Amino acid sequence: MDKFSCIPLACIALFGAVSAGHAGGFQRGQADTDLLYESGSFASRFGLSYINPARGFDKISGVAGDYGTYTGDYEVPSVAVKFGGDRLACVATYVRAFAAEADYTGSPGGALPAPAASPFGSRNQQMEFNSDEVAGTCRGSYDVGRQRFSLLGGLYAENFDFSASSLTVVPSARSVQTPFGLAPVYLPASIEAKAKDGLSPGFRTGFAYEIPDIALRAQVLYRSQTTHVSPNGSASGVLAGSPFIVAPGVGLLDVPGPLPLGSSLPIPEAFNLNDVVSPQNLGLSFQSGIAPGTLLTASFRWTDWSTNREFVSWIGDAPGSSMPFHWRDGYTASLGFGRVLADNISVLASVGFDSGVSTGAETTYTDLYTLSGGISFKQGIGEVRFGGLIGYWTSGAQTLSDGALFEATVGDDLVYALNGSLRFAF
């Protein structure tokens, strides 16, 4: 009897679900294509990961303080259903592939500083986007003795949904007389904006080599880039402070105004973003039995994050405001060992490294070192898995000279993650 296959390959998928949720850049989850290798004619897996990245600024514009964490915790759902056998199988998947959430209301004045070159520019308060993927991927296999060769391919479609709030200053139609002449009146405004794009297509392709008798599998899988072209939506604004003028030699002076705080402002409703890119990636994974009941696993993934330069947004015909990233490509690697404890219980432990993609224009995604573990319980046609991860995020800084809108630093932080999944197969 095979002494290695009793280690559930799904236990390895469990670690992929946990580790993908904290990978550099906006990566959240990956399609559960590992289900293609499950034996039997039908298999399904339903998973949920919880990630708490706990990142906050130590200094903003050179001022140290307790600004709280701006990276919100989040969940990553995943669903996969597989049909087929040893020669041909297909899997339908759903996953939250990319996302981000940031809350900067703990910063001075309840928002990030205005760009150094534009003191009346937009000050980001909150930002969130989600990109969900639905996909179909198939495997065709050919056996040669104890060996199996497989080709993988499929299509996916991904949406994009964005929302943000900011503080800014907008000109009014009023002017007031001063000793220096007429001065335009400016209005502090709180802006809410939303934009979305429908489904944009992409593809996966790859190949795998297996020796099932010793649970050996080497796989290469490529996911194409997808571009969401000019997501658009609407924006609205309300008065967020006292109207003011800029008096030469004096500075800002409040002036009485007819509108109470919270009054709607005549903000153009049209809101647009620049093209948004979900980057291509290439993943390599390897596993092999190395002793009775013991499995070695390894993975490496390259992601083309250098395509993510910045978010640029426009309200009506006004000049665009930007959120720069200027990221470099990202690399994620892991090494793990699995062990059978009993006929229906397996465990796996793994160490990982995720190279930071931040280059100084922003400083969230620095180098990350991780330690993860998980356990699998199998009974009949069902299986339950639980896993956890702790990560060490290195410190970093963003500077004006590197393209940042303002200067800031982050310290060493921790990342926590939990995952659970339920599988049925027959």
Image (spheres, rainbow, N blue to C red):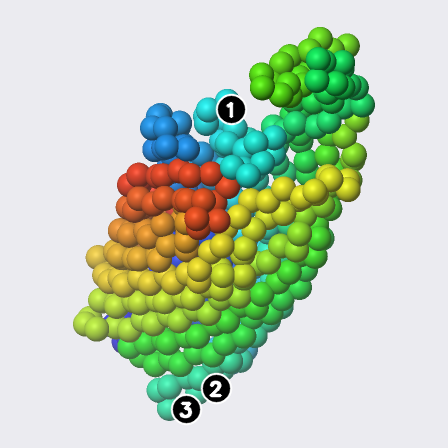
Local secondary structure at mark 2: strand
Q: Which of marks 2 and 1 is in front?
A: 1
Q: Distance between the residues labelled 3 and 2?
A: 7 Å
Residue 306 percent across, percent down from the top left: 49, 61
Q: Residue at x 34, y 28 (%)?
A: 64
Which residue is more in the foreground, 286 or 413?
A: 413
* Amino acid type for the residue under numbered disc 1: Gly
Residue 182 percent across, percent down from the top left: 76, 19
Local secondary structure at mark 3: strand
For label 2, the residue is: 142
- Tell me, yes or no, whether the two marked residues, 2 and 1, touch with CB atoms within 8 Å: no
Q: Is residue 23 visible?
A: no
Dot 2: few (<14), some (14–19), or many (≥20) neighbours within 10 Å? some
Q: Residue at x 34, y 45 (%)?
A: 396
For label 3, the residue is: 144
Q: Is residue 298 visible?
A: yes
| Count of marks placed on residues | 3
